[in-house]
Image (tube, coloured by chain):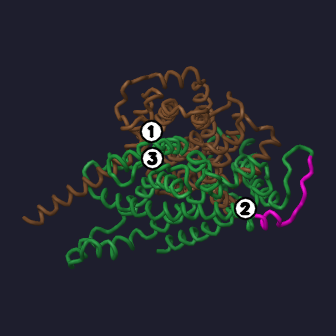
Chain colours: A green, B brown
Amino acid sequence: MVVLNERRGAAPAAPRRPAASPDRRRSRRRRGWLTPYLFMLPGVALFGVFILFPIVQALQMSLYDWNILRGAASDFIGLDNYVRAFTDDRFWLSLSNSGIYMVLTVPPQIVLGLAVAMLLRSKAPAQPLFRVLFYLPVVTSWVVVSLLFKYLFADQGLVNFALGDVLHITAGDTSWLSGRWTGLLAICALGVWKGVGWSMMIFLAALQGVPQSLEEAASMDGANWWQRFRVVTLPAIWPAMLFVIVMLVIGGFNVFTSVLLMTAGGPGGQTEVLLTYMYQQAFSNLDFGYGSALAVILTVIVFIISAVQLRVFRDRGES
Amino acid sequence: MRTARNRRALTTLRVITLIVGAVVMVTPFVYMLSTSFKPQAYVLQNPPQFIPDPFTLNNYVQAWTTQDFARYAMNSVIVAVVSTAVSILISSMMAYAFARFEFRGRELLFRILLIGLMVPAMMLIIPQFVLAKYFGLLDSLPGLIVFYVAGSLALNTFLLRGFFAALPAELDQAMQVDGANAWTRYWRLAIPLARPALATATIFTFLASWDEFAWALTIINSPGNRTLPIAIQLFQGQNATQWGLVFAASVIAVIPVIVVYLIFQRHFVQGLTSGAVKG
């Protein structure tokens, strides 16, 4: 193939600076087709070795009773690891916990993120300050906020104090991190708190594209707040809405650090999610084959969601 | 008259709601800061203290001196800076080739890159561990850097390609007429013009490497190679959690991030709105 720009540049017998020596020019023309590949080479090499190859290898490992020790043989066992997953109660438990995490974190992040964005749009007082404050958790590392929430949800922590001694909603002695549902609730609270700022940012950007004139017209026609929102605002930000939903659902499958640091999957594996279970199988039990099978199952789930995402983007481009 | 008063009431309500929300968002940070100045005996006191009494700097002193924290911070700086620099260089080269050349396999390569964008990092952690073992990269900073660079290539290339493609091609052609070769056009023309996009990519890559936890947890064993997230997490692991120490270390690790965020806010918004960046 001919390089696009080289071809264009060569067509008119353009006056070249004498500085470009004839030697260099000739070698450049000869090497012309090679140029883009040279630009691509370092990236493609790194990407191929450290991302693509592992993708293929994950598939391969999932078919073996993989032995990590050097020299030890790994037995090919076909789909046994997958069969094992589907009959493994702890796999189903962690899958359902991942599902619960998504159900409990995605809608609140969307509703709250959109609500804050609506409140902040069009010259809210101190808008930049609020934006920064709401976005702060997003830029803070997962390790730090996970430990922070573990501390807040400790038996004598701030949450129990606020719920018990201040608001009198509970007795204030909930042992949050030592039960399945309370533990998941604490983990989800962190997920929502950390994620609201992100969806707010996306919605804020999307809301700027809503035609003000349409809203005013609807307002003139006597539409109330909710009608205006439903008929004018929501359709205008719908692509952003779909984007946020898909990203949050994928993000929900990727929850790992917060679970590992807040409950470590405990008590007794009750709060395990897919990734912590996979990690534990691989790096505590050294069962790399089974861990890989779990990773492949997760990847398939995420890919299905991503396919939806790509379709959404295509629709967004057309509309 | 009534509408004016209504509007004012609405604005007040709006601001009050926002303030309540902001308090919920910020309280954990304030409490973390406060705890980092408390002696261990006071960290889980009832009622909780927001203003530490007695006040102590001991946690910071201890984190910084006895725990080899300076070493961990240095490791984090090295890993994040090198990963970011290499990733930006390599992905901007790829992005330039995608945006400015037509060559066999371009579409295919781009599609493959998109796959990399969709596969979450954690899914590859097992085969990557085996690979790192094979290359002798376990328990080393290069082992972190190589995988951080590889992991950030797809997204950065994707972001930068869009920006390069939007630059006027006439500038390229003019330089070419002047006899500039492809590398000069990339380095002297495209890179300086793409500074805003490069800033966005730089910030996101830097923060991702600075905060990365799972891979570092998996391959780093020796204390000398720990990065900040690993070190902070370990403070919590040793017998009774030293919350004051944990949060003193956290504050030290978080401050640079917040400073970067406050300075480069604009680029954060650009990065978010231009594509699939999830913080």
In 3D space, how far apart are the residues under numbered discs 3 and 2 (Cα atoms)? 31 Å
Residue A138 visible? The answer is yes
Q: Are marks 1 and 3 in contact (CB under 8 Å)?
A: no
Q: Which residue is mark 3?
A: A137
Q: Quadrant of residue A71?
A: top right
**Are the residues under marks 3 and 2 on the same chain?**
yes
Q: Amino acid at mark 2?
A: Val
Residue A76 highlighted magenta (yes or no): yes
Q: Earlier in the sequence, mark 3 or mark 2?
A: 3
Q: Chain of mark 3?
A: A
Q: Quadrant of residue B215?
A: top right
| Element assignment for label 2 | helix
Q: Which residue is mark 1?
A: B258
Query: Residue B126's spot in the image, x, y percent?
Result: 75, 51
Q: Chain of mark 2?
A: A
**Magenta segment range?**
A72-84
In 3D space, how far apart are the residues under numbered discs 1 and 2 (Cα atoms)? 36 Å
Decide if residue A120 is on the left or right side of residue B57: left
| Element assignment for label 1 | helix
Decide if residue B228 is on the left or right side of residue B137: left
Q: Amino acid at mark 3?
A: Pro
